Amino acid sequence: MSEKVMERLCDLSPLVEQISIDEAFVDISDLREDAMTVARRVQGRINDELGLPCSIGIAKNKLLAKIATEVGKKSARKSEPPNAVTIVPPGSEASFLNPLPVDMLWGVGPKTAAKLVQYGIKTIGELARRPPADLMRWFGENGLDLSRHARGLDDSLVVTEHEVKSISQETTFIQDISDDKALAATLRELSSQVGRRLRQAGIAGTTVRIKLRWPDFTTLTRQVTLAQSTDQDEEVYATALSLLNKVRARGKAVRLIGVGVSGLGPPLRQLELWGSETEKSRKLQAVLDKLQAKFGKKVIRRGKNNNHKGE
DNA sequence: TCTGGGGTCCTAGGACCC
DNA sequence: TCTGGGGTCCTAGGACCC
């Protein structure tokens, strides 16, 4: 459904920046038509052709358009899904922003909002009237951005392509898990998913990271950087497992476990001096991928007693 | 307000190098 | 052998976003 929505946005202009599964910026500056007409038409297509509600904000920059969308969504009646179009006409930016709460601003989450309240700042208008120097003192470099944003200033462009920086999978157990084997099995499954996504994207990464959440909700990460980048399930898994064994005592209960790979780039394959165990393993992986793509994930899997080299 | 499953960016300290 | 300055890379955690 996400792809179908994005296709309809691309019909408006090629300048589409997808920022999540269900949200995107479209640069319509070059369109001749009136903005409201454009918005209602694309909204209508998404409603009618896809059966989905959607809210749209239109303004002179991304920051304001985003906030306009949020304002529109909030104004929806509770009985219906939000399906608003909100326009911030040129010249009305300040009066539009002024009364809104600061946490509607990009980059203001619970922590920053709480800090701002201590300085007596609750609305975007109050923030905008504060001298930038004050904000710099309180928030460092971020203070300047905060001040600009509060005044509605944002010159960021609509960017059509984003480089992926990391790929990860995690899962929270319905009940905390203490069993070492069950945990390892989950880690293997997550590692395979990460590996598959890496290969699908045609990339490999040098840093493997695990994430753990204990039953008391404290969360930690451990990572290690490999000598060579990898896109192989077994290498991700073996690395992740050794990280896990370093931080977790046997039998210790876990609420969440995750694996990720970063330091991404093209999958350069270096020839190994001492033969080609990894090469064999890589070819095996390629065959597994093909089989699973054709017949489904359960058609074949690795045996239980393998080490991480060859099977 | 919290949860879950993804992500990004920033900071700080330490190792290491010139 | 020690000191200082500057830089990079790695690791860990946290804030924030949807």
Image: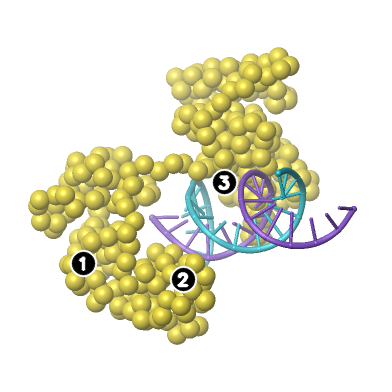
Chain colours: A yellow, B cyan, C purple
> In this orientation, which residue lies closer to the viewer: A166 or A284?
A166
Q: Secondary structure at mark 3?
A: strand
Give the residue at x 61% y 36%. A206
Give percent across and percent down for residue A186.
Answer: 63, 39
In the image, residue A176 sits, relative to residue A271, either above or below, namely below
**Residue A153, labelled with which disc?**
none
Circle 3 chain = A
Q: Local crowd at mark 3 within 10 Å, few (<14), some, or many (≥20)?
A: some
Circle 1 chain = A
Give percent across and percent down for residue A92.
Answer: 20, 72
Q: Amino acid at mark 3?
A: Thr
> In this orientation, which residue lies closer to the viewer: A300 or A279?
A279
Q: Secondary structure at mark 2?
A: helix
Of the numbered discs 3 and 2, the one sitting upstream in the chain is: 2
| Residue at numbered disc 2 | A143
Judge depth for marks 1 and 2 and give the one in front: 2
Image quarter (top left, top right, bottom left or bottom right) of the N terminus of chain A? top left
Give percent across and percent down for residue B11.
Answer: 59, 63
Q: Is residue A226 left or right of residue A290?
A: right
Tags 3 and 1 on a common chain? yes
**Number of on-image labels:** 3
Give the residue at x 66% y 40%. A225
Q: Amino acid at mark 2?
A: Gly
| Residue at numbered disc 1 | A88
Give the residue at x 71% y 42%. A243
Q: Is residue A212 visible?
A: no
Q: Quadrant of residue A308?
A: top right
